[in-house]
């Protein structure tokens, strides 16, 4: 009997049993003013996560109807000042919430900024497809999503002969007649003439249609209920949204909030905040209201029946694994086992240094019996010159080092700074500070070229945000960000941190002097005045201060408390090793694009900051984790996982790594003797790169290479990870099948093919060597038999030569998926 019960319990869902309790949200409700209200949501919850929405079945009651009443849908409305308790009952369980009513008898007026504009935004009136378009619609031009309420108020109340808002006869206002289709309206019916939205606009017009008033509070933050939910496919959940304002009062703004899902295939959400779970995984239900955003995390565990011991016995090497395994447990995704030593050494060399290990290095590593050999291998890789090549190249991509926008001497100066910084393992905070505060000659102070690359103030502002904060604020140049909290005002305050940086030509060829002047500000394009300089979410500086503002910016940027700086770097490095960023894309860090494992992200970032921004420490942490060292072979239960690291994510090698690997395996270096000119498709000779230089040692993206371009090498013209293309193309297939790059290496008299011909290497030995060189493993018995037959048939064919047979052997392995992908 005990055995039967133990067996049964071990296969029950891992979230626990019989531990759910009824909860009502919000659990504390302040109602201010006669027009306030609050929708309740009743859920079964466990460990702070909603498990089921019971609102539709719940019965509600108010302990004191003289203070507040609640209807059958769970909407609470004030009746008089005071406190009361609302009780919700469902399936024999009860839950309560406190209601506090204030200012019930106070004079009330709807706010244009806080009520009318959000209503119009929700109705789509100021969207890009309607009156928020650049040229407006039907003669009415509103600011996009209401980012300029002052201008919108003028347009609505003063233009069109004041017919849009009729204070004397509100019913005759076009603002009411058009969206209710009482008059023809190209945008269709937006709300009914007996709706709450109609009454709100009507009351606002009737009471004077006031614009922005000094006494209007400002939106401070959003709160969403429930914050987390664990559901199963087919379940539904209502999300409610509460806005908190600068005067301390809160309002239910669910009906005017914008909703979207990060993963519709997991959980879709309607305009009213109703969520329906469609599949397994995790999704963020993003909520926007005004200039603030928030998110609800919806988890739908996979329908795998797993014993808890699957996770208990999973290898955990460090902090990474604790959080990865916790996430896998919550999703019921079993982790795959560890990769083999041969898989690990090939993976580690490619990920950390962009090279293949030699056959001798593989043999020594596999034969090493020490349990610490993987950690030792990682340490040795981080001290290799190829590590410096790889990461100097990677940061050159990020910083756009290229002679297309820099003179050759300046380009070399910038590259040498980057390479030296990597070689010295310069802490990332110091590296960033030296760039954003750089002054002087671009030939002697390489990081000063950052400002030459971004001469335009908007380009400099936006590139700085992407490079060091991992976020795009380009939208805010013209209007408030549609998906984030950043505003146009914040953008131009941020821009004024750099507005006093000036450039002056030096005496030497290609030399520019970068310096900060004590004057010079950029004006806000809409306001016509300069915004006080300020980093994002930071206190502003004074416009009168003549000191170099970049120093203050660098202090803020590299502060251990900065919530963006360390996260941006951690996400880039994590993606390099794990195949996918904790936030994807790697330079799209925003609240509405949450990480796949927030707790893991937070822990790794904190560890990186505690380690004083040591990039090698970060790399060691990732590479030493069991998560990194898992096999890429999936289990039936985790095959669908592409972001939770239950197995290693297979990915194609970068263009440069593939080309260098071709050179390494064939023993024929790639010549880099041409450089692109400014003329379309034109090239010129260059002697800067002697024979033997690898792709990852090139400082300049202008070095001519059709192969690198075809396989996605970035041009280094814009600060965006999207510049590097990883998608398969027809051009790549042509390069692999019959391209000059690989064929020339195989046909070269200096290739391994020629060497093996001279050495009279036998068929089996040739097959074994190619596999060891390219794939870091011996051929299987099946593979050996297959290639042995091919070589034997070629030997028997009078039209085929031994050389052609060996070339075909190399070609078959070097164009295989196993070679082109890191596994």
Image (spheres, grey):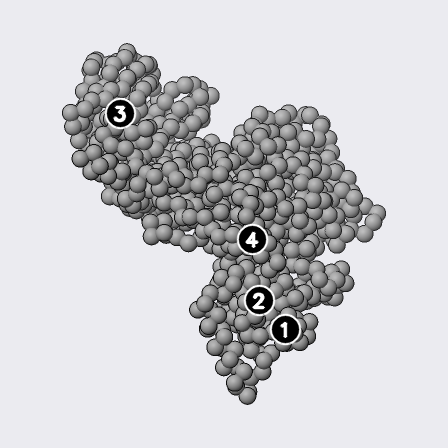
Residue identified by numbered label 1: 756
Mark 2 residue crowding within 10 angstroms, few (<14) / some (14–19) / many (20+) = some
Is 642 above or below relative to 526? below
Q: Residue at x 28, y 11 (%)?
A: 82
Q: In the rendered view, does 52 fall on the left or right side of 658?
A: left
* Residue at the right extreme of this rendering: 507
Is 788 above or below relative to 1? below
What's the CA distance linking mark 3 and mark 1?
Answer: 76 Å
Is 166 above or below relative to 448? above
SS type, badge 4: helix
Reading the chain from its start, which is encountered first: label 2 or label 4? 4
What's the CA distance linking mark 2 and mark 3?
Answer: 67 Å
SS type, badge 3: strand
Reading the chain from its start, which is encountered first: label 1 or label 2? 1
Residue identified by numbered label 4: 367
Q: Residue at x 33, y 14 (%)?
A: 103
What's the CA distance linking mark 2 and mark 4?
Answer: 18 Å
| Pointers 3 and 1 in contact (C-beta within 8 Å) | no
The label on residue 769 is 2
Q: Residue at x 79, y 44 (%)?
A: 444
| Pointers 1 and 2 in contact (C-beta within 8 Å) | yes
| Front of the two marks 1 and 4 | 4
Mark 1 residue crowding within 10 angstroms, few (<14) / some (14–19) / many (20+) = some
Reading the chain from its start, which is encountered first: label 2 or label 3? 3
What's the CA distance linking mark 4 and mark 3?
Answer: 61 Å
Asked if residue 56 shows in the view, the reply is yes
Residue identified by numbered label 3: 24
Q: Position of residue 586 (x, y in %)?
A: 51, 45
Reading the chain from its start, which is encountered first: label 3 or label 1? 3
| Front of the two marks 2 and 4 | 4
Mark 4 residue crowding within 10 angstroms, few (<14) / some (14–19) / many (20+) = few
């Amino acid at each position: 009997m005990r055995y039967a019960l133990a067996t049964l319990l071990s296969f029950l869902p891992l979230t626990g049993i019989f531990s759910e309790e009824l909860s009502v949200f919000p659990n504390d409700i302040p109602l201010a003013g006669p027009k306030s209200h609050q929708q309740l949501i009743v859920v079964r919850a466990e460990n702070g996560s909603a498990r089921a929405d019971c609102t539709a079945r719940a019965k509600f009651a108010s302990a004191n109807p003289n203070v507040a009443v609640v209807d059958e849908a769970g909407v609470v409305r004030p009746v008089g000042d005071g406190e009361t308790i609302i009780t919700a009952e469902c399936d024999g369980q009860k839950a309560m919430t406190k209601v506090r009513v204030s200012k019930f008898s106070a004079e009330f007026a709807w706010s244009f900024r806080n009520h009318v504009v959000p209503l119009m935004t929700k109705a789509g009136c100021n969207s890009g497809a309607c009156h928020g378009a650049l040229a407006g619609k039907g003669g009415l031009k509103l600011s996009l999503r209401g980012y300029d309420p002052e201008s919108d108020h003028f347009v609505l109340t003063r233009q069109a002969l004041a017919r849009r808002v009729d204070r004397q006869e509100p019913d005759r206002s076009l603002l009411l007649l058009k969206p209710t289709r009482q008059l023809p309206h190209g945008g269709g019916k937006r709300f009914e003439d007996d709706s709450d939205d109609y009454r709100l606009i009507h009351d606002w017009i009737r009471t004077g249609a006031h614009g922005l008033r000094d006494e209007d509070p400002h939106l401070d933050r959003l709160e969403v209920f429930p914050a987390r939910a664990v559901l199963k496919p087919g379940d539904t959940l209502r999300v409610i949204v509460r806005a908190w304002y600068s005067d301390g009062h809160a309002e239910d703004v669910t009906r005017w909030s914008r909703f979207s899902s990060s993963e519709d295939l997991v959980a879709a959400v309607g305009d009213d905040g109703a969520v329906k779970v469609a599949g397994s995984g995790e999704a963020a239900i993003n909520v926007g209201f005004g200039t603030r955003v928030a998110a609800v995390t919806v988890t739908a565990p996979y329908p795998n029946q797993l014993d808890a011991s699957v996770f208990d016995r999973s290898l955990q090497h460090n902090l990474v694994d604790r959080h990865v395994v916790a996430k896998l447990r919550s999703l019921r995704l079993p982790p795959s086992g560890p990769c083999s030593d041969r898989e690990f050494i090939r993976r580690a060399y490619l990920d950390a240094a962009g090279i293949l290990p030699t056959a001798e290095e593989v043999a020594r590593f596999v034969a090493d019996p020490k349990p610490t050999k993987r950690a030792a291998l990682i340490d040795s890789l981080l001290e290799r010159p190829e590590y410096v090549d790889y990461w100097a190249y990677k940061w050159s991509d990020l910083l756009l080092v290229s002679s297309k926008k820099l003179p050759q001497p300046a380009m070399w100066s910038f590259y040498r700074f980057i390479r030296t910084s990597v070689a010295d393992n310069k802490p990332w905070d110091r590296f960033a500070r030296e760039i954003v505060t750089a002054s002087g000659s671009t030939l002697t102070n390489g990081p000063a070229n950052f400002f030459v690359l971004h001469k335009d103030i908007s380009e400099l502002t936006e590139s700085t945000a992407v490079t060091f904060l991992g976020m795009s604020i380009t939208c805010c140049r013209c209007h408030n960000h549609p998906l984030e909290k950043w505003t146009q005002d914040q953008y131009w305050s941020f821009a004024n941190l750099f507005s006093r940086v000036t450039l002056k030509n030096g005496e030497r060829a290609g030399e520019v002097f970068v310096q900060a002047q004590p004057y010079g500000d950029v004006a806000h394009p809409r306001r016509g005045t300069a915004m006080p300089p300020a980093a994002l979410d930071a206190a502003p500086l004074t416009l009168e201060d003549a000191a170099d503002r970049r120093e203050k910016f660098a202090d803020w940027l590299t502060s251990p408390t900065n919530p963006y700086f360390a996260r941006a770097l951690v996400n880039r490095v994590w993606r390099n090793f794990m195949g996918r960023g904790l936030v994807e894309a790697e330079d799209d860090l925003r609240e509405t694009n949450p990480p796949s494992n927030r707790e893991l992200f937070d822990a790794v970032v904190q560890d990186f900051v505690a380690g004083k921004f040591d990039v090698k420490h970060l790399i060691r942490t990732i590479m030493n984790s069991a998560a990194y060292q898992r096999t890429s072979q999936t289990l039936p239960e985790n095959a669908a996982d592409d972001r939770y690291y239950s197995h290693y994510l297979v990915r194609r090698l970068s263009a440069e790594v593939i080309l260098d690997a071709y050179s390494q395996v064939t023993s024929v270096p790639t010549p880099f003797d041409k450089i692109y000119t400014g003329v379309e498709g034109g090239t010129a000779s260059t002697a800067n790169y002697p024979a033997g230089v690898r792709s990852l040692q090139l400082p300049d993206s202008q070095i001519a290479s059709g192969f690198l371009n075809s396989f996605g090498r970035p041009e280094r013209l814009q600060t965006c990870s999207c510049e590097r293309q990883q998608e398969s193309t027809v051009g790549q297939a042509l390069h692999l099948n019959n391209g000059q790059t690989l064929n020339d290496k195989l046909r070269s008299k200096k290739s391994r093919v020629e060497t093996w011909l001279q050495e009279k290497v036998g068929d089996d030995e040739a097959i074994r060597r190619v596999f060891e060189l390219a794939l870091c493993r011996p051929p299987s018995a099946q593979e050996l038999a297959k290639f042995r037959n091919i070589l034997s048939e070629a030997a028997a064919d009078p039209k085929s030569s031994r050389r052609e047979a060996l070339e075909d052997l190399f070609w078959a392995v070097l164009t295989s998926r196993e070679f082109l992908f890191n596994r």
